[in-house]
Amino acid sequence: MVLAGSYSGAARLRHVLSGSTPFACTSGTGLLPLCAQAAATWQRVDNRDGPPSALALSSIRALATSMITAMMAGTGRSRWCEISFSPPVAAAETFLRLYPGAQFVCLHRNCPDVIRAAIEANPWGLASAGLGSFTAAYPGSSAAAIAAYWAESTQSALDFQAAHPAACHQIRYEDLVDDPDLAAGAMFAFLGVDASPPPEAGGEEPYAAVPRAPLGGAGVPASFLPRPLAERVNRLQQRLGYPPVT
């Protein structure tokens, strides 16, 4: 399972995962939030708080497994990988309860580059970008709205990583671009997969088929971000080994 924020460069990671590996990769199926919603419904049915009951877990697992089996049918692959964008921690927690052996790759990307990628993808505004609550909070600044979204999704992923370190592997988009063999090798070692880079036509470098977005060149004027938001972003940037937004 890949936990990624929007505009984090997940297409490149998917390319790596779906190369010479056993993974059948899907994205945006909604399976994680569906499992979380089913768990919430079962709590109301059972009239209980706390973790789902054994009956609830069994029922949800049967539903999820049937969907996973259908998605893998005909792929010839032996393992399934979903790229899930900005899932709430509760959704990932529920999935881990359903499948205690599940492994999570948490993809991160430098905040200024996420801001640039989001603005370039939505030059006429963020109304259709799925960032409604953030644009409402920062109606005068697309940069601030995207930074707030980045901070929320990054914090959520880091909280999940901290709670389940043995089940999680952190990978930065920049490392996947700068040294893909090293970054991918560490990831596949965590996943217990002996995988080689996908072959490229014409003797190109491994992973060259996926365009490389520019890295590290997107400055965000400090005045674009309210001070409390900038401070939160910089705390998270520091945790991920990125320079501060200044």
Image: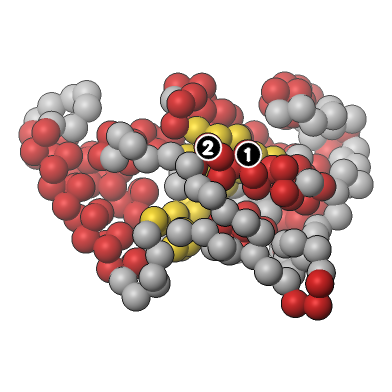
**Mark 1 belongs to which amino acid?**
Ala
Quadrant of residue 145 within the rendered picture? top right
Q: Going 73% across and 71% down the picture, which residue do you hit? A: 200
**For the residue labelled by badge 1, is the local secondary structure a helix, a strand or a loop?**
helix
Residue 17's quadrant in the figure? Answer: bottom right
Q: How many labels does the image show?
A: 2
**Residue situated in front as seen by the camera: 49 or 28:** 28
Q: Which of 44 and 243 is in front in this view?
A: 243
Q: Residue at x 75, y 61 (%)?
A: 206
Q: In this view, does 176 lie to the left or right of 37?
A: right
Say left or right for 237 vs 184: right
Q: How crowded is mark 1: few (under 14 residues within 10 Å), some or many (20 or more)?
A: some
| Residue 229, position as x, y percentages in the image | 72, 28
The x and y percentages for residue 139 are 69, 46
Q: Looking at the image, do the residues carrying marks 1 and 2 touch, with CB atoms under 8 Å apart?
A: yes
Circle 2 crowding by C-alpha within 10 Å: few under 14, some 14–19, many from 20: some
Q: Name the residue under label 1.
A: 186
Horizontal and vertical percent position of residue 19: 58, 64
- Asked whether, in this view, residue 58 is left or right of residue 112, the answer is left
Q: Where is residue 68 in the image (x, y as percent from the top left)?
A: 30, 60
Tell me if residue 115 comes above or below residue 22 in the rendering: above
- Taking the spot 56% from the left edge, 40% from the top edge, the residue there is 189
Q: Residue 28 carries which label?
A: none
Say whether residue 56 is left or right of residue 148. left
The residue under label 2 is 190
Distance from disc 1 to disc 2, alpha carbons, whole Å, reads 6 Å
Residue type for callout 2: Phe
Relative to residue 80, is residue 92 depicted above or below?
A: above
What element does badge 2 sit on? helix
